[in-house]
Image (spheres, helix red, strand yellow):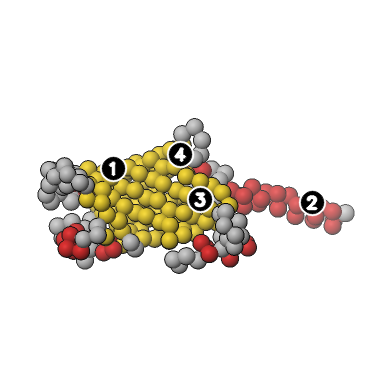
Amino acid sequence: MKKVIFFTLVCTFINLLAPQSMAAPVQFIIDKTHQYIGFEASHFGFSPVRGRFDDVDITLMLDEVNPEKSKVNVVVYTKSIDTDHEPRDEHLRSADFFNVSQYPEMTFSSKSLVFGKDTSSGKIVGDLTLLGITKSITLDFKLTRDAPFPLPGYNNVRTLGFLAEGSIKRADWGMDIYLGEAIADEVHLTIQFDAVNCAGDAAKAPSCKYGR
């Protein structure tokens, strides 16, 4: 009888733990060969200046039980700015703009996700820290695809395509040089990446190792 009671208690304990385990967020690995952090700003109303950051760390924690609690964190190493013109890049690294010697990192940390009609798109609210100033911003996001990676040799690794876009006023972060016609205050931001679930055999997929 004691064995029956003990077994019943163990089963009850396991059942209590199971929902918590299922609810635990899962960290997806970012395929660094398919990530992009970019920006665009008007230049005298002619062709806009477009650029990207080549050195970036992104973390995605996906909570499928409570999707609104999923997290996206981005660390941008500002020295890696690239606009395909080195003299301009050096100026952008100076104290006039990103001041990379004093502020080597720019970060975005999500606080909440607000979904539309489904869980594939919506708004992502987070803190953007730039030049030592932190302000809340809102970006539109969508999951461009959620599927096993279709190429042979990828172990059917589950892959998410993520895209977030929005605009900020650079002067809100103290970057107000040449403000106006020369360089627009409004800057369009883009965050895009592939994220892969490398659990189990999927860890052998090439995208679980790319760029890491």
Position of residue 34 measured from the top left corner of the image (x, y, whole percent): 43, 57
- The tag earlier along the polypeptide, 2 or 1, is 2
Find residue 167 and report its image quarter: top left
Q: Which label sits in the foreground, 2 or 1?
A: 1
The dot on residue 121 is 4
| Residue in the picture at 31% in, 59% down | 53
- The tag earlier along the polypeptide, 2 or 3, is 2
The dot on residue 8 is 2
> Relative to 117, is 92 on the left or the right?
left
Residues at discs 2 and 1 in contact (Cβ within 8 Å): no
SS at badge 4: strand
Nearer to me, 31 or 118? 31
| Residue in the picture at 84% in, 57% down | 3
- The tag earlier along the polypeptide, 4 or 2, is 2
- The tag earlier along the polypeptide, 3 or 1, is 3
SS at badge 2: helix
SS at badge 3: strand
Measure the alpha-carbon separation of dots 3 and 1: 24 Å
Residues at discs 4 and 1 in contact (Cβ within 8 Å): no
* View extreme (right): residue: 1
Residue bearing mark 3: 160
Residue bearing mark 1: 167
Measure the alpha-carbon separation of dots 4 and 1: 17 Å
